[in-house]
Amino acid sequence: MPCPECGTATAPGGHFCHNCGRALEIPTEGLRVGDRRIVTALFADLVGYTKLVDELDPEEVRVRVDAALGIMGQAVIHFGGSLEKFIGDAVLAVFGVPAAHDDDPLRACLCALEMQHALPRYSVGDQPLELRIGIATGEVVAATRDLAGIRSVALTGDPMTTAARLQQLAEPNEILVDEATASSGEPRIGVERIGERLLRGQRRPVSVCRLYGERRIVSHASRRSAPLIGRDAEKARLSEIIRRTASTGKGGAALVRGEPGVGKSRLLCEMEEVARAAGLAWMWIDNAPHSMVSPFRGVRNMVDWLADEQGVPAGVVGRHLLFGDDVAPNLDPDVHRLMLGAIAVLARDSEMDLLPEEGWESGMPTLADANEIQIGLRLATHLWVTRMVQDKPRCVILDDFHWSDPSSAQLLDIMIRMAADLPLVVLAGSRPPATPDWADVPHVELIELAGLDEASTKELGAAVAGVSIEAESAHWLYERTAGNALFVGEIVRTLHERGKLEQVGDSLRIDGGAARQSVPLSLRALLGARIDALPPGPRYAVETASVIGMTFDERVLLELCSDGCDSSGLQTLVDAGILAMVEGSATPNVQWRFRHQLFLDAAYGRLLADRRRWLHANLADLLERSEHRADAAELARHRMAAGDGARAIELLDRAAREAAAVGAFAEAEGLARTAAELRNGGKVGEPSVAPMTQSVPAT
C-alpha cells in the first residue's frame, strides 16, 4: 500500500515508510488474536555512522544515509519481506509475516546480498558506506498490538534477538547467518560454516555461518543424500522419451505433477545421467517464488546456462544464435527489425546488458507497439530453440514450473510445443492443481507423483539414516508423512541430529516420546507457508480442525468455527491438498481427514496457548451437548488441554472404569495413572503438538 504521508510504495506488512518514516497501519486480519510463526529476521546496520556525523557535514550525511536506508528498504520489498522498523542507521526486516513463503530464509539472504551490492552507490564523500548484517530463522509469536492508536504486529522470539547479535558480531561488509537459515537457503546460497559462538545475552551457543554469495543451481545433484526410491515406473517413462528422441531426432515433453516434497525435482535430477548417456546436452532451469515478479527471469537463466556451457558472455551467445553470420544474411529485414527490437525490450526488462563489443548495436531502439513486441519475441523464440538444438539434441528441465515468471512462461510454452519436431526433450515439474495449457498437447506426457508406499517409505528412511528402521517405527513414519519424500528425509535427519534414534539390534527405533510429536523447523516453515497462502476463512478452519483431530465431522467443525468458515472453505482445503473427504463413512454426516499428520501438527503448532485452550474447552462443551456424546477419554483429553483439571479427573476416572469393564486393562491403568498425576499436582494441558490420532463423533 502507498504511504499516506508521501505516497511511496511500502513493503507488505511494513511498520514504517522507508522513505519518510511515518508509522503505517498494518493489515492484521490473518492473525486474529495472534499465532506462532516461523520467520527469518534480518538486521542490517550501517558501519561508522557516528564517525561520519562527527567528521562530515550533517546535511550531506543525512541525505546519503537516508538514500542508503531507502535502497535497503526497496530490497526488502523486492524480496517480499516486511520492514519491521528503522532504528537510527539500522534496518530490521522480517520474512514470514504477515504472509509466509516457501523460501523466506533464501529471500532474506538474497535481500542481504542485494543490499551489500547496492550500497557502494551511496558513499559519503570519499568514505564508502559499509554494512554489517545478521540473519536468523526460528519461531516467533506474532500478535496484534494497539498502542497510541496505531495497530501493528508485534513479534517476540529468538530470531529477532539472534539476528541483532549476529549483526554485532559481523565485520564490515560481512553477512552472518545462523544454521537454520543456511541449511534452508542451500544450495542456492554459498556459506562458510565458522563454528559455534555464544552470543551476548543468550544461554546456548549458535552455529554461525558466513554468507558469501548466491549460487545458480546447476542441477539438484547437490541434494542427493539418498538414492531414488520407489519411482521405477516414472523413471522408465521419462527415460523412454529421452532415448526415443536420441534415436529418432523427434522430441517430446512431460509434466511431472505432485505436491511439494513428493520428489519431483529428485526424479528430474535422475534424468541427467540418462540424457548424457544418450548423447543429449543438459540444461536445468530452476524457478523460485521470489523471482515471479522478475520479467524474463527464466529466459535469462537459459541464456546464462548456454553462456556458462560455452565459456563466453551471455550477450555473445544471444548474438550468435539469433543474428550470427550464418543466420543474419537470410533474415527478412522486417523480421530482423521485429526480433532486434523485441530482444532490446527483453534485455532491458531482464537487466541484461547488450554490449557493442559483443556485436550488438549501441543504443538499440526498442519496440513500443505491444503487438509488435509479441510478434518479435515469438519469432526470436522459434529461431532460438531451433538453433539451440541444431548441433546436438538437448534435454531441458523446468523445475518448479508453477513459479515461472509470466513473461518467460509464454516463451517456454512455444519451446514445449516445438519439441515434437526437434531433437528436444522438455521435462517440467509442477504442483497441482494448476495445469498449463501445453499439458494437453499430444506429445506431452502427464506423470502424477503420489506419496511413496509404506515399503518405499521404510527404505527411504533407512537410506537417510544409514541403517534399517524397525517395522513399527517405519509404520509411524509412513502414517505421519503419507510417504512424502521430503518429509521423510527431514524427520529422520532431525531425529538423528537430536539423538532420538535408538539402536535396537541391527535396526533403529524412533524414540516413542517427544520425538514423535516434533516437527522439524524446515517443515514447519514449508507447511506454514501453505497455510498462510489460504484465504482467512479456510485458514481459520484448518487451524480449528487441528484441535479436533486427524478425522472430524463437518458439522462439528462448522459449529466450532461459528461464522469463521463454511463448507466452501473446506473445498478450498481439498484443492490445496490439505484435507480429503472420508469415503464410506459409517456416520450420516460428511467426514473429513487431514491428508497427513504433519499438516495437523503444523496448524496446531500455530495456535497461541490461550486460543488453543479456548477451542478445546468449546469443543468439549459442544461434544457434551451432542446427541452422540464423545467417550469419556476423548472428553478428558479436551478438558486437560483446556486447563480444566477437575473435570478432566472425573472423566479419566470414568474412562478407566469403562475400559476395565470391557477387559482393556492396560488402557484402564494408563487412564488411572494420568488421573492420579493430576490429583498430585501434575501439569494440566498437553504438548505443543496435537496427538497423532484422534476423532470425534458427529453432533
Image: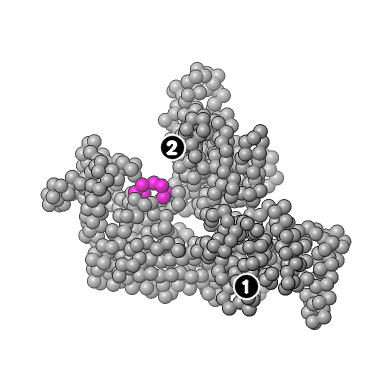
Q: Please, what is the three-letter code of the amino acid marked with disc 2?
A: His
Q: Which residue is the site of mark 1?
A: 589
Pick whichever, 662 or 471, lies toward us.
Answer: 662
Q: Please, what is the three-letter code of the amino acid marked with disc 1?
A: Asn
**Residue beneath the point at 58% across and 73% down:** 582
Q: Is residue 276 visible?
A: no
Which range of residues does the magenta coloring cover? 291-298
Query: Residue 221 at x, y = what percent?
Result: 43, 60
**Residue beneath the point at 71% across and 62% down:** 619
Q: How is the image coloured?
A: one colour
- Where 98 sits versus 45, above or below? below
Secondary structure mostly taken by the magenta-highlighted segment of the chain: loop
Relative to residue 214, is residue 307 drawn left or right? left
Say how many tags the image has.
Answer: 2
Q: Which residue is the site of mark 2?
A: 117
Q: Which mark is residue 325?
A: none
Q: Residue furthest bottom?
A: 663
Query: Residue 77 at x, y = what percent?
Result: 48, 41
Pick whichever, 409 or 515, lies toward us.
Answer: 409
Quarter occupied by the C terminus: bottom right
Relative to residue 128, is residue 339 drawn left or right? left
Pick whichever, 291 or 473, lies toward us.
Answer: 291
Dot 2, how many residues are within 10 Å of its Cα: few (below 14), some (14-19), or many (20+)? few
